[in-house]
């Protein structure tokens, strides 16, 4: 066991047989020289992130079917989206202090990369992928259940779709439906990140990011709702 990872092993409740998989899961692309995958080091976390995303989705979807036997597909989908979104992954990464273990280029670490939600979320998915590759589904599912079960328990009522909620809010204040505008697109072709802006006439816009335009629109709508909710609270205070 690497002494530098002892604390992480305890939080994972798992010790890797192939420690190189954990090293790969903790390596940000910025730390790979020239952005190229080194055959000797295993490269960065992007491949394991790709796998971990699917493993997380499988475990969460299966768990939701068992928990909410009377829920329809739409209700299950809203719960699922709440549990696998980047914000939730980043929260779990913070719970296990994952940022402290990440291998980043000096410039990226200096820019606060170890605390960036997108990087934490990606690394958390990569960690799940590494658990699966090293020990199969059982250790990966055990990790997911340990850190996600309480979050699933809290979803007694299926969360309302943020875009639907924002549209209902706009109607309630006499405004036209929200407009969504693409602000930015970055990242590799297999792992893009879109930034969308939600606009409602007469109100300050809000932006959100995600791995698809649809997910980014949901994030922008959620940010807009949080913004107007904060404004209402400030006015009432």
Image (spheres, rainbow, N blue to C red):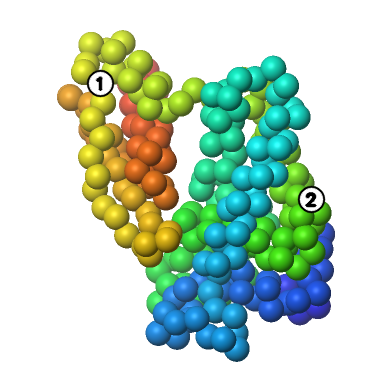
Q: Which residue is mark 1?
A: 177
Q: Residues within 10 Å of mark 1 (few under 14, many from 20)?
A: some
Q: Which quadrant does the C terminus fall into?
A: top left
Residue at horizontal 60 percent and vertical 59 percent from the top? 51
Q: Which quadrant does the N terminus fall into?
A: bottom right
From this view, report whether residue 21 is shown above or below residue 59: below
- 139 or 12, which lies in front? 139
Residue 139 in view of the camera? yes
**Mark 1 vs 2: CB contact within 8 A:** no
Dot 2: element: helix
The total number of labels drawn is 2
Q: Which residue is mark 2?
A: 142
Image position of 51 (left or right of 200)? right
User: What's the distance in space between the residues labelled 1 and 2, CA to CA?
Assistant: 43 Å
From this view, report whether residue 76 is shown above or below residue 172: below
Residue at horizontal 35 percent and vertical 23 percent from the top? 166
Q: Earlier in the sequence, mark 1 or mark 2?
A: 2
């Amino acid at each position: 066991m690497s002494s530098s990872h002892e604390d992480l092993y305890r939080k994972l409740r798992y010790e890797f047989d192939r420690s190189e998989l954990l090293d790969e899961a903790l390596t940000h692309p910025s730390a790979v020289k020239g952005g190229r995958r080194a055959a000797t080091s295993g490269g960065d976390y992007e491949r394991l992130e790709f796998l971990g995303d699917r493993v997380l989705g499988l475990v969460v979807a299966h768990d939701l079917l068992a928990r909410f036997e009377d829920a329809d597909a739409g209700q299950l989908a809203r719960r699922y989206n709440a549990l696998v979104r980047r914000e939730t992954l980043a929260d779990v990464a913070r719970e296990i202090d994952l940022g402290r273990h990440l291998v980043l280029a000096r410039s990226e670490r200096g820019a606060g990369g170890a605390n960036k939600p997108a990087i934490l979320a990606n690394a958390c998915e990569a960690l799940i992928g590494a658990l699966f590759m090293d020990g199969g589904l059982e250790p990966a599912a055990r990790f997911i259940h340990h850190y996600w079960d309480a979050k699933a328990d809290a979803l007694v009522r299926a969360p309302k779709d943020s875009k639907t909620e924002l549209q209902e809010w706009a109607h309630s204040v006499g405004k036209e439906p929200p407009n969504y505008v693409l602000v930015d697109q970055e990242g590799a072709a297999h792992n893009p990140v879109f930034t969308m802006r939600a606009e409602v006439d007469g109100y300050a816009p809000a932006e959100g990011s995600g791995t698809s335009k649809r997910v980014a629109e949901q994030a922008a709508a959620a940010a807009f709702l949080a913004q107007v909710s904060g404004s209402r609270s400030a006015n009432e205070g």
